[in-house]
Amino acid sequence: MKKLTTIVISILFLLGLMACQFSPNIDFFDKKTTQPASVVVVTPTAQPSYSGGTIGISDSVLSDIFDRVNPGVVSIFISSDQGQASGSGFVYDTEGHIITNFHVVDGANYIEVDFPSGLKAEGTILSTDLDSDIAVIKVNVPADQLVPIPLGDSDALKVGQLVVAIGNPFSTFSSTMTMGIVSAKGRILDSIRTDADQNSFTAGDIIQTDATINPGNSGGPLLNLNGEVIGINRAIQTSGTTSDGSPVNSGIGFAVSINIVKRVLPTLLLGEKYDYPYIGISSSPYDFTLAEYRALDISQTSGCYITSVTAGGPAEQAGLQGGTNPTEIPNLFSGGDLIIAVDGKSIISYGDLISYVFTHKSPGDQITLSIIRDGKQMEVPLTLGKRP
C-alpha cells in the first residue's frame, strides 16, 4: 500500500492539481525520439456475438476479428522538431477521420498514415483533447478505401473479459495482434494537460489490461471479442528499460475507455474543445491504510476522502470540506468529508468518482453526493463546473 508519508496528497479532482505523480514508471510510449522511425459506422456482417468471460474460444474467432478489424487499423509516422516517432490509430468513419492519441501527433510538422492495404496518405490534425489524450486526424482517402471499426460499450466490460489489441509496435511490426484480459476498470492517470504551475490534471475511466502493448501501440484499438473498440491504448507501467532505452512491458497497460471517447468525439469532429466537468476537490489516488483511516477518525474504510477544496470552486460553493486538522501521520489532515456515493451509486475509491462523472455528466449538471461528516451521513447537491 502507498503510505501517505511517502507521497504528497494533492490531486484536485477533475480540475484539480495533481502534485504527486501517479507513478514514476508510467510510460506514455511514442514520445518524440530521434530514431527513424456525417459519421458512418460500418458493422461487419456475420459478426459473432460475444458476451465476455469465457476462455473456451477457438482460434477462428480471433482470426475472424483480425480479418474484419485490421483493415481499419493504421500506422502513424510523424516528423517534428524533436525528430521522428510512430504510433497507431484506427478508422472512425468513411469521411477520413482517424482516431489516435494526442501524444502520438504532439508537435508534428508532418503526419503519414499507412493502411494495411499498402495505401499511404498525408494526415492533418483536426482537433485534440489533452485531458484524455485523444486526437482526430483527417486523411483525404476515397471512402471505399476506409474500413471503420465499430465502437463498443466500455461500461459493459467486466474484469477478466478477454480483449485484443492491434497496432504498430516499435514502428516496424505493423498489424500486430495480441490478446489479454481486462485487468481492472476505473483507473486514473495524469492528464497531459497542465495548469499554469505545470501541475497535471487528472484523466479518468482508464482500462487496465495485460494484453501486450509496446511503444508504437499508442493510439491503436483495444477490442472486445465482437471486434468492437472498447479502448484506445495509451500507456504502460514499465519495470525498467532495455539496453537500447526502450521501456520494458510489465504486463500492465492502460487504455482510454471508449465511452469517454464517444462523449468527446462529437465536439472534436467539429474542431472544437470538449469541456470536462469540474468538482474542485483534492483527494488521494491510492487506498488509505487502516491506520490512516483511524488517524482521520473515520470508521468507514472506503470512499473518496476530500483532502482539500479549491477556493471558489463548485465543491466550496456546495459546502464540502477538506481536511485541516494535523494528525500523527505527516501530510495527513483530518476533518474532511468522505464521499461514499454519487447519485446513489456507491463510491469505493477516487477513481470511481472520476469515472462516473466523466462518462455520465457535463458542466452545468447537478449531482448529489452522499458524504460522511463527523460520523453522520448527509446528502449534498452540487452543480458541476467546467475545467478551465
Image (cartoon, grey):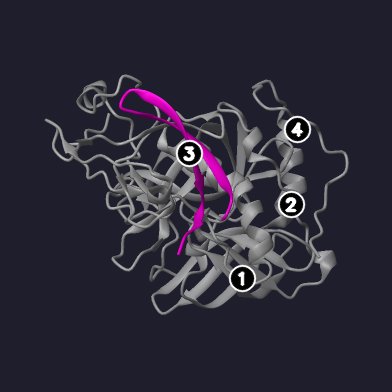
Q: Dot 3: few (<14), some (14–19), or many (≥20) neighbours within 10 Å? A: many
Q: Which residue is mark 4?
A: 60
| Residue 96 in view here | yes
Q: Residue at x 61, y 53 (%)?
A: 261
Label 3 to label 1: alpha-carbon separation: 26 Å
| Left or right of 320, for residue 117 | right
For the residues labelled 4 and 3, say whether their Cβ atoms are less than 8 Å apart: no
Label 4 to label 2: alpha-carbon separation: 19 Å
Q: Amino acid at mark 1?
A: Glu
Q: Earlier in the sequence, mark 4 or mark 2?
A: 4
Q: Amino acid at mark 2?
A: Ile
Label 4 to label 3: alpha-carbon separation: 39 Å
- The disc label shown at residue 149, or none: 2
For the residues labelled 3 and 1, say whether their Cβ atoms are less than 8 Å apart: no
Identify which residue, 336 or 379, lies in the foreground: 379
Indicate the secondary structure of the residue bearing disc 4.
Answer: helix
Q: Dot 4: few (<14), some (14–19), or many (≥20) neighbours within 10 Å? A: few
Image depth: mark 3 or mark 1 in front: 3
Image depth: mark 2 or mark 1 in front: 1
| Left or right of 31, for residue 166 | right
206 vs 105: above or below: above
Q: Main secondary structure of the magenta part?
A: strand
Q: Earlier in the sequence, mark 3 or mark 2?
A: 2
Label 2 to label 1: alpha-carbon separation: 23 Å
Image depth: mark 4 or mark 3 in front: 3
Indicate the secondary structure of the residue bearing disc 1.
Answer: loop
- The disc label shown at residue 272, or none: 1
Residue 228, horizontal then vertical, whole percent? 71, 43
- The disc label shown at residue 353, or none: 3
